[in-house]
Each structure stands twice: as C-alpha cells, then as structure tokens.
Image (cartoon, rainbow, N blue to C red):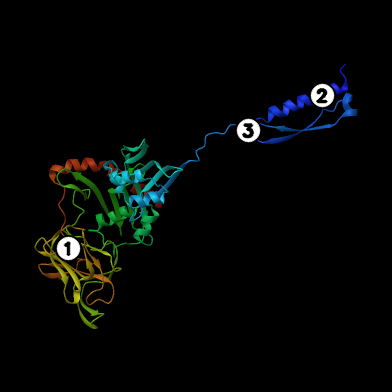
Amino acid sequence: MLPQNTLLHAHKMKLHWFVTLSTLPLLGVLTAFGIMPQTAGLSASQYSVIENIELPLSAAQPSDASVFWRNDRVQRGDTVSELLRRMNVQDPAADEFLRRAPSVRSFRQLRVGRTLLVESDDAHNLLALRYTDNDGNQVQVLKDGASFRVTEQAAETERRVFVQTGEIISSLYAATDEAGLPDSIANQMVEVFGGDIDFHRDLRRHDKFSVIYEMNYLNGESAHQGRILAAEFVNHGRTFSAFYFENSSHGGDYFSPDGKSMRKAFLRSPIEFSRVSSGFSHSRFHPVLNKWRAHKGVDYAAPIGTKVRATADAVVTFVGTRGGYGNVVILEHQRHFQTVYGHLSRFAASLHRGQRVAQGEVIAYVGKTGLASGPHLHYEFKVSGIQRDPLKVALPDGKPISEAQRTAFDESTRDLNARLSLLRNTRIAKLD
C-alpha cells in the first residue's frame, strides 16, 4: 500500500494535466481550482490545490484588416477624382486610368444615383471597383500588377407581366395607388382612354379598371417605364377596352376589340391631369376685364411650370406674345384644324415657327402671362378658323386595323381578351 504523501502527489499531477489539456485553446494565464474527491481514506488530510498555469500564446492568424470596402452613389457634378476622394482612394494610377481608358468610358458616363463598390488597401490604393453601367451591364475593374484589368458581364434582362384591378372611390390616382399600379402605367391608361373618357369631368365613384402590363428588369431591378398590353375601363356603366398591337410597318398602337384605333387624331386635353376652371361659353364675366364677354376656349387650372402637350401632330405657325393671350403657341393640324395655347410661362427649348411636333410632345409650360388672374392654360380648338368647344366637338379617329392585319390582331389579342374577361368576372363575383 502506497504512503499517503505519494497518493497526494499523484492526484496533484493528474489535476495539473487535466487543467492544462482542457484549456490549451485559450490565451493568457488561467488560475485552476480543483478539489480532491472525498474518500474515506483521505478525509483527515483533505485540502484544496491552487496552481497558476502559464498557457502558450496561439500563433497569429492572417488578418483582413488591411482591406477596406466602401460604397457610394454618383452625385450631380461628380468627377472621377472627386468620387475616388470621397471613397478614400488616393491612387494616381487609378485616377489616370479611370479618367482616360476607353474600356471604362461607361464609368465616366454614369447617371446620378448609380452605386459604386470600391476595394482599397491600407495605403489607399485601388484594388477593385465594381459598378452597373447605364445599360445594366456589370463592370469590374481589378488591380493587375502595375495596371488594371476590366471585365464586363452583360445585363440579365427579364420581362414580367402584371395584372392589377381597381375601383375609384375618391380620385383616379388614389385608386391606382391603392391597386399598386405604377404612375407611368396609370398615365398610359389616361392616354389610352383619353379620347373616349374626359378624365377631368367624366369620372364617377365606383368606376372600375383592369390593366395587364409588362415591365422590363435589368439584374432584378426595374429598368423602364413599362407598357400596357391590355386594359379595360368601366366609366359610368360604359365599358371601354384597348389592346396593344404591333406590326412591322406602323409600329405599335392601341385598338378596341373590333380593330378601331383608340388614339384619336386629337387628345381631349393638352395637360395630362388637371381640372377645368372655366369652360367654353358665349357669355362669361371676365375676371380681369370685369365685364361680360365670350370665352371661346377652355381654361385648365394648373401650377406654373406644368407641361403643355400638343394635342395632335402639327406644324407650329406662331410662337411668341399676342395681346391678352400673353405667351402663346398656335399649331396647325391637317389644314382645317388649329389649336391655341395661351398664358404660357415659357416655351419648349428651340420651339420655332415651321417646326413639326408630334401628338403628346411638350411644347410649353403653364403660366399666367397676358390677361390672366392666376396660373392656368387657355386652350382653343378651331375648325376652319371657328372656335369649337374642345370638350364636346367630335374628334376624328385614328387609322383602324387594316384587313390584311386583322387576323394577326385577333390572334395576338385572344389571350389578353380572355384574361380581361376573367378579371371582369372575378371582380363582379367579388362585388356580389
């Protein structure tokens, strides 16, 4: 039988190795506390063992602390040098390369708001630059020895089709917002049905609409305004439908189910969305002259600077100032028709007499020049020199689908028409 001192020494050695092995991954100095097991043979001599155990420092691991990533957005007026400075890059070689190399011309042409991602070292040298160019291509500039290497990956394009329906409770745009319809698509809907529906006066509570539209995406982000493929609008019990149809000779346009053009020769309104502040009248009290006189046009109340559009393809016959009209533009259409746009604040850049303008093209901006008590647009519609009420005059239609294209039109719109019918029936069931 071993002496008691020998037993105590053996237990101490076991405890020493147990603590050492169990704590090797740790750094620094560890104080270990151990209590010997309570046995009958050792009870008279039981005591605590306290030892300081020095642990070796682990080998230092490589650190990424010397590499820095930063991102920023292109701001108005930025130069290459300013962008690099803002991202804490102080690299003359990179500055020179980005300012002059043809392979990164797209970097120098980035639109405001585009995002940049930069990698640099602790000496502020450029290691990598990544960005998406204006066409959606992903560009990468990498440090390659004493120079830089540029790689480009084509944009991933995707076409998505959406379907939305809505009901008007307070206003058109409140309804389109509630339905999740993008503003660009809502504006297109106004243009498509603008020849049949006066969106200034004809809208009624509980009017309904359904829209099938496409949006293009680049690298998962919306890239363009999108386009309506088919739409239906129920206004005061009347249903209007429109389908987009494109052929190789005349481009794309919107047509009713029977092939008639939805595009009238004239837009009902020269302002996208506003309110009529004064209608066509043979006797109206003039707010500036303070007397009764005929008002042979329509006034649209709108803030100064609101865009004014040509209501049809035309030739500009007058741009300038004329009496009570103030700043005015006069357009001539198809020889028998004229339109007049008065009280303007300014004209579109370079607009001049003899210039051809297209329907919907911006020609001027709302103002209050001439005999105007407040900012608004005065609009006249003339037939053979005689003013007619632009809100009531029968407007000529655009060209319908030709007989040669009728079969192709029916085939291309069959599926869209079925979707609109399904939406209509679903909406009715929901209302019931």
Which quadrant would residue 293 be assigned to in this image?
A: bottom left
Q: Are marks 2 and 3 in contact (CB under 8 Å)?
A: no
Is residue 350 positioned above or below 14 on the image? below
Q: Position of residue 252 (x, y in %)?
A: 20, 47
Amino acid type for the residue under numbered disc 1: Leu
The numbered mark, 1 or 3, whose residue comes first in the sequence reads 3
Closer to the camera in the image, 232 or 13: 13
The numbered mark, 2 or 3, whose residue comes first in the sequence reads 2
Give the spatial CA distance, label 2 vs label 3.
Answer: 29 Å
Mark 3, Cα crowd under 10 Å, few <14 / some 14-19 / many 20+, is few
Amino acid type for the residue under numbered disc 3: Leu
Amino acid type for the residue under numbered disc 2: His
Where residue 351 is drawn, which disc sits there? Answer: 1
Closer to us: mark 2 or mark 1? 2
Where residue 9 is drawn, which disc sits there? Answer: 2
Closer to us: mark 1 or mark 3? 3
Closer to the camera in the image, 142 or 57: 57
Furthest residue toward top: 1
Can residue 428 be seen here? The reply is no
Which quadrant would residue 138 be assigned to in this image?
A: top left
The numbered mark, 2 or 1, whose residue comes first in the sequence reads 2
Mark 2, Cα crowd under 10 Å, few <14 / some 14-19 / many 20+, is few
Mark 1, Cα crowd under 10 Å, few <14 / some 14-19 / many 20+, is some
Could you tell me which quadrant the N terminus lies in? top right
Q: Secondary structure at mark 1?
A: loop
Where residue 384 is drawn, which disc sits there? Answer: none
- At horizontal 31% and vertical 43% (from top left) the residue drawn is 97
Where residue 57 is drawn, which disc sits there? Answer: 3
